[in-house]
Image (tube, coloured by chain):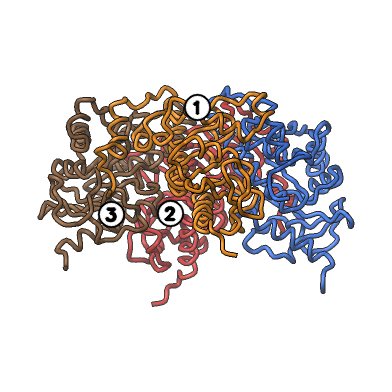
Chain colours: A brown, B orange, C red, D blue
């Protein structure tokens, strides 16, 4: 039977395949979803299936309450976190969760990743934020929904379109974007920022953040009204 | 002549080939065995043979006292350690020994690997334990059997089915699982946990362990009675 | 239509392709240009185009004031920096800008990279210099031209033919050479020097620089009047 | 014309090709030689030729005083160091010089690499030694011959057959073996030991060396009279 979600599942599948290709996860770790805002559903990786055997048809389509709309497999155990973010962050079309090595190390040590240089400022104009550690109370309620709530809380005074990534304390990163592909790109960038920042800190534990005028310059030349980076 | 251990040797061989593929060892370092609990024998890599030239037929089948049951090559010098663990840990069907880089560094520094985050808690609910350093007396007896005894001693108050890995002080890791394949998976996971933990400690030498309520949540959602990770 | 800049664009293109091949940048980061000193133009990577889809015909030919001479795409946003260096440093025929991991970490921490050993002295006889951090004033003028000015200022008392690399504070490295190929080679060398130096400093934060007589010996045997390294 | 050194050149060539394959050097860094003790000549890599274009016929055959016996290219600039070691260390048939990342970092920081664990003890029963830093006087004489003298001096109270590797202070490692292949193997092992040791030291700057009774046990089970590792 032909699926009316074929394109969405294809997008999610392709983006999921980038996870092992880019070295962002071993084994079955990590998951990517692609969102259809008109129909308010997203396609997500099935839980615990390894990337090698994954097919586009395996993607599970769920609504924003994590009810399965199409698919025979159980969706990722992190599905409710994805749903919470799609509901709260208007304009995002894809979400990635990985346990990539350096970003996860920062999430475990849990300071935000300092904005040390222009590689970072090319992508976001503040430190990569880190959520608070979840309380025992929250864990005892609905863990995956609460992970979403934790992230949303961390973005109360932030714009998720300008800061498309977060570290969940003691856990690992989530990134997002206009599309699933862009969310994967942000996951790649985050891992590289996390690695460069950890080496920077090793060289000088007192390394100073980039001055704000340089941050704004780099961020604006790529993302501002008068951006002149790229071809569009 | 057809071997009645063909399947067991095939399993052990395939699992051994994963060691260099996964970057867990250089040259001839490391070895994997696969256990047949009914016949109380296991197939293990021959000693000092490199992975490239290894054939399924080269696997050596030995009993729990390390007597060769089938095979013309000398079994791994660590055979008695494998035998001791199969005897002591009911329900395990495969054992892996590697000198993988980060896990070996922790074994050399020899604190246990702290449970810093959920990547770790997804697999075991305590620090990766490290044995005591072997005494001169023990070394002078039967070194490889004593390595097994050292590990077993370290698990007196632990469940090897819940904590499928250990660091041998001053030496390197051993991991195990229901099958040789799962034991290799645990060796891959351990190396990644060891790497993330060493970066975490570099970022913050005082980094705190994950609170127990988060440890239990993550461990249980994958391994508890009401586990909901994966497809089974 | 046949381009009269075909060779130059081919050189620039080939050199750009080395950037991802050598692991010097992810995604679209980085750019290489090749200079034709007779015609006072250079071919450079178009802005924000990824390496996989890059063609020789995409290279943009510009003059030293960054005016496009040939090409339909927008040149790299760093074009004015390249132009400033070609104008100021006689004899260089290629420039590379990357955000390679270890060199960028040093640029962020911003001490110069100490000359710890002969691997370094084989290529340059002083620390890898780091520019001053750009002032808010300079940023508000012409950022990319000022980046060039910053580097040129750092080379007031230096010979760019003997020290073919620099760290731009808070940003990332630039390297150059007689050809675009040699500039890429210097980018590869710089990343390796940066990595070895960061491990050296990790082993001993008080590690001492190589004595000058050893620096001179190694630099001269490769680059001096009586050089005897290599075949020419 | 058929060379009477065909086999020797082939051995040296094959061993040289392992250098980039094993990730022990970038570009033209590093060199391997293979020794024919009966004819007192060795075949060595030509100076500054990159590995990709290297042919067996390019190998240069020289005598122990570094006079070219066969070959049209200039031999490695380190040829006199190789010659000095072949003359001084009886029984060695191959020498490798690399600037591999971690071993070079230790050579730059220049403490010996501590014997932290059994991976190390499986190969040598003491710290990896580091020579003294060459004096200005020695440099002004014959640099490459003096590098050999420096190493030989460091082995006055050591057995080069038991400790087949050394760090040259401020420079990089040399390794050797019964054959050129074994010398390459030792270069691979040294780089891995250097990496594990640097991570160990990062985890615990006060990490203690392996007790001598464990060192002896591991070294002897592989290299002692009653060795039982491997198949011979």
- Provide the secondary structure element on which disc 3 rests: helix
The chain carrying label 3 is: A
Quadrant where the image shows the N terminus of chain C? bottom left
Disc 3 and disc 2 in contact, CB within 8 angstroms: no
Depth check: give the residue in front, D79 or B91: B91
Cα separation, mark 1 vs mark 2, equals 55 Å
Cα separation, mark 3 vs mark 2, equals 23 Å
Q: Where residue A171 appears, x then y in whole percent?
A: 32, 35
Give the number of the mark in front: 3 or 2. Answer: 3
Disc 1 and disc 2 in contact, CB within 8 angstroms: no
Q: How many numbered marks does the figure carry?
A: 3
Give the number of the mark in front: 1 or 2. Answer: 1
Instruction: Answer with left or right where residue A83 lies relative to residue D30.
Output: left
Q: Which residue position holds label 3?
A: A181
Q: Is residue B129 above or below residue D91?
A: above
Neighbor class of circle 1 (other Cα within 10 Å; few <14, some 14-19, many 20+) is some
Q: Where residue B210 appears, x then y in whole percent?
A: 34, 27
Residue, x 24% and y 44% (percent of image)? A77
Neighbor class of circle 3 (other Cα within 10 Å; few <14, some 14-19, many 20+) is many
Are tags 3 and 2 found on a single chain?
no
Give the number of the mark in front: 3 or 1. Answer: 1
Cα separation, mark 3 vs mark 1, equals 47 Å
Instruction: Answer with left or right where residue A65 lies relative to residue D203.
Output: left
Q: Which mark is residue B154?
A: 1
Are tags 1 and 2 found on a single chain?
no
Residue, x 36% and y 37% (percent of image)? B119
Q: Can residue D146 be seen at all in this image of the molecule?
A: yes
Q: Which residue position holds label 2?
A: C31
Q: Quadrant of residue D74?
A: bottom right
Are tags 3 and 1 found on a single chain?
no
The chain carrying label 1 is: B
- Provide the secondary structure element on which disc 1 rests: helix
């Amino acid at each position: 039977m032909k699926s009316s979600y074929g394109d969405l599942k294809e997008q999610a599948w392709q983006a999921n395949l980038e996870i092992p290709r880019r070295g962002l996860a071993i084994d079955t770790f990590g998951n990517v979803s692609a969102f259809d805002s008109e129909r308010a559903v997203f396609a997500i990786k099935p839980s615990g299936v390894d990337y090698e055997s994954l097919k586009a048809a395996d993607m599970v389509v769920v609504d924003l309450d994590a009810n399965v709309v199409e698919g025979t497999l159980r969706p990722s155990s992190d599905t409710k976190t994805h749903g919470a973010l799609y509901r709260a962050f208007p304009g995002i079309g894809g979400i990635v969760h990985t346990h990539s090595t350096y970003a996860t190390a920062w999430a475990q040590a849990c300071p935000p990743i300092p904005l040390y240089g222009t590689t970072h400022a090319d992508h976001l104009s503040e430190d990569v934020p880190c959520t608070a550690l979840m309380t025992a109370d929250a864990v005892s309620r609905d863990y995956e929904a609460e992970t979403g709530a934790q992230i949303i809380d961390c973005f109360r005074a932030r714009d998720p379109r300008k800061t498309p990534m977060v570290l969940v304390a003691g856990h690992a990163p989530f990134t997002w974007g206009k599309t699933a592909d862009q969310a994967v790109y942000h996951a790649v960038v985050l891992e590289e920022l996390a690695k460069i920042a950890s080496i920077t800190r090793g060289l000088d534990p007192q390394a100073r953040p980039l001055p704000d005028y340089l941050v704004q310059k780099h961020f604006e030349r790529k993302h501002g009204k008068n951006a002149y980076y790229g071809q569009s």
